[in-house]
Image (cartoon, grey):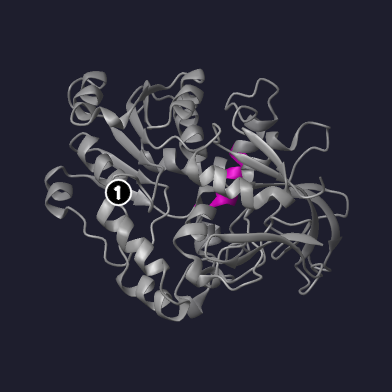
């Protein structure tokens, strides 16, 4: 089969690799019809490549048709159209039964002291071959795959159940926005776009998106979001206060993560570590890395006293300095973590099935490209060129 493989620092290639097969009774094999590029993939591409081996298959947002099932794959059947959550969870353990599927005790990568295994996401998370490929082996298939109607509708109606939508839904739930209250979303990439729409759907009265890229602001505005350009400098905080009764928003969602713009020293440090041999860079990153914290600091500055900051952007630094005086003095609540995808999919499925498309899932993808052009797609997405907000790859084009 063809799959997108890692070839080294910011180097990807669509290559022939062995077809996946059933390895455990709870496995299934899915023929991938659509697979997306996530902002988290860009962290691998530019920051966390020292944890990937040459030839590893990338990607963790995929859907398709079941081709083969193991003897213990539950009620999954050949021919089912399914979305595959990016977190691999069993549904039966102590964590899963408490809605913490991203901490699944069956798939936890204990050798790395990490949570549940993830598709296509480095040695840290199990080195499970990813979904940017023609076929995907799906462990824990008795629980993970979400069946969706085979009704001829575009994959993009359901594809984002794999990651973007549950991540955004959880971000808003964790933000604890009061009914009719206010929330700021920092970063209007795919997760930020959906978080802003979800917040409005869940009853927020004021939703503000902060984003430097005009095309991303324009997309959010189409869905009723008020947007601001962070390039306004010191005027940003004042503009947000003007929109939130003078005190700041009830909640802020950081949808950016470790590669925020506006953190030049940390950016230099990340790039310098990336130039080291993997054997040196990996332990250094695990024990002494820092993130670019501009977005997170913006969240802390903007949120009102007694408010909540919800972090959905991925962070990986071990030595990030936090402004504890500010957090304590403002009496802030912080919530964060990988999305517990299967906790939220039952709530989300009726919304994405609704012909009215209340979350605007059909207005997110800006580029659809063949898998062969995935290296170009990564570069375009990383550079925010050509109005790129969300790329979907077609493995069979």
The residue pinned by badge 1 equals: 334
Taking 170 as reference, is 24 above or below it? below
Picture residue at 29% right of the left edge, 51% below the top: 293
Residue 356 on image: x %, y %: 66, 20
**Toward which corner of the image does residue 304 lie, by quadrant?**
top left
Residue 260 on image: x %, y %: 35, 47
Tell me where the magenta segment starts and ends, as one range.
339-347
- Res 91 visible: no
**Toward which corner of the image does residue 217 lie, by quadrant?**
top left
- Residue 304 in the figure: left or right of residue 19: left
Residue 112 among those drawn in magenta: no
Assign the C terminus to one quadrant of the image. top right
Could you tell me how many numbered marks the image carries?
A: 1
Between 276 and 262, the one nearer to me in the picture:
276
Between 251 and 215, the one nearer to me in the picture:
215
**Toward which corner of the image does residue 72 lie, by quadrant?**
bottom right
Residue 346 among those drawn in magenta: yes
Residue 176 on image: x %, y %: 36, 37
Question: Of helix, strand and loop, which mostly describes the magenta segment?
Answer: helix
- Label 1 crowding class (10 Å Cα cut-off): few <14, some 14-19, many 20+? some
Taking 108 as reference, is 138 above or below it? above
């Amino acid at each position: 089969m063809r799959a997108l493989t890692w070839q080294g620092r910011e180097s990807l290639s669509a290559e022939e690799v062995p077809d996946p097969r059933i390895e455990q009774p709870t496995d299934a094999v899915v023929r991938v019809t659509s697979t997306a590029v996530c902002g988290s993939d860009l962290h691998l591409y530019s920051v966390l490549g020292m944890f990937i081996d040459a030839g590893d298959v990338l990607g963790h947002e995929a859907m398709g048709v079941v081709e083969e099932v193991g003897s213990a794959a539950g009620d999954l059947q050949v021919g089912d159209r399914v979305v595959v959550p990016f977190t691999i969870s069993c549904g039966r353990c102590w964590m899963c039964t408490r809605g913490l599927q991203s901490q699944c005790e069956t798939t936890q990568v204990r050798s790395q002291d990490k949570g549940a295994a993830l598709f296509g996401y480095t040695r840290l998370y199990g080195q499970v071959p990813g979904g940017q490929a023609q076929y995907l082996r799906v462990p824990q298939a008795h629980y993970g795959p979400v069946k969706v109607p085979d009704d001829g509708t575009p994959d993009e109606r359901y594809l984002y159940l794999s990651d973007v939508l549950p991540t955004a839904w959880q971000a808003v739930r964790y933000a604890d926005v009061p009914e009719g209250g206010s929330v700021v979303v920092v970063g209007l990439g795919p997760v930020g776009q959906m978080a802003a729409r979800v917040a409005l759907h869940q009853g927020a009265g004021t939703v503000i998106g902060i984003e430097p890229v005009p095309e991303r602001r324009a997309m959010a505005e189409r869905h009723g979001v008020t947007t601001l350009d962070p390039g306004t400098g010191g005027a940003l905080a004042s503009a947000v206060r003007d929109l939130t009764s003078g005190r700041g928003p009830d909640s802020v969602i950081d949808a950016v993560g470790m590669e925020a713009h506006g953190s030049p020293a940390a950016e230099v440090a990340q790039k310098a570590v990336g130039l080291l041999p993997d054997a040196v860079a990996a332990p250094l990153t695990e024990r002494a890395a820092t993130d670019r914290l501009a977005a997170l600091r913006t969240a802390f500055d903007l949120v009102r006293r007694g408010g909540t900051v919800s972090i959905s952007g991925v962070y990986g630094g071990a030595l990030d300095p936090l402004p504890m005086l500010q957090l304590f003095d403002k009496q802030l609540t912080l919530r964060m973590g990988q999305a517990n995808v299967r906790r939220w999919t039952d709530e989300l499925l009726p919304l994405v099935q609704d012909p009215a498309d209340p979350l605007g899932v059909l207005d997110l993808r800006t580029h659809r490209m063949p898998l062969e052009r995935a290296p170009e797609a990564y570069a375009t997405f990383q550079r925010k060129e050509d109005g790129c907000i969300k790329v979907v790859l077609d493995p069979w084009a």
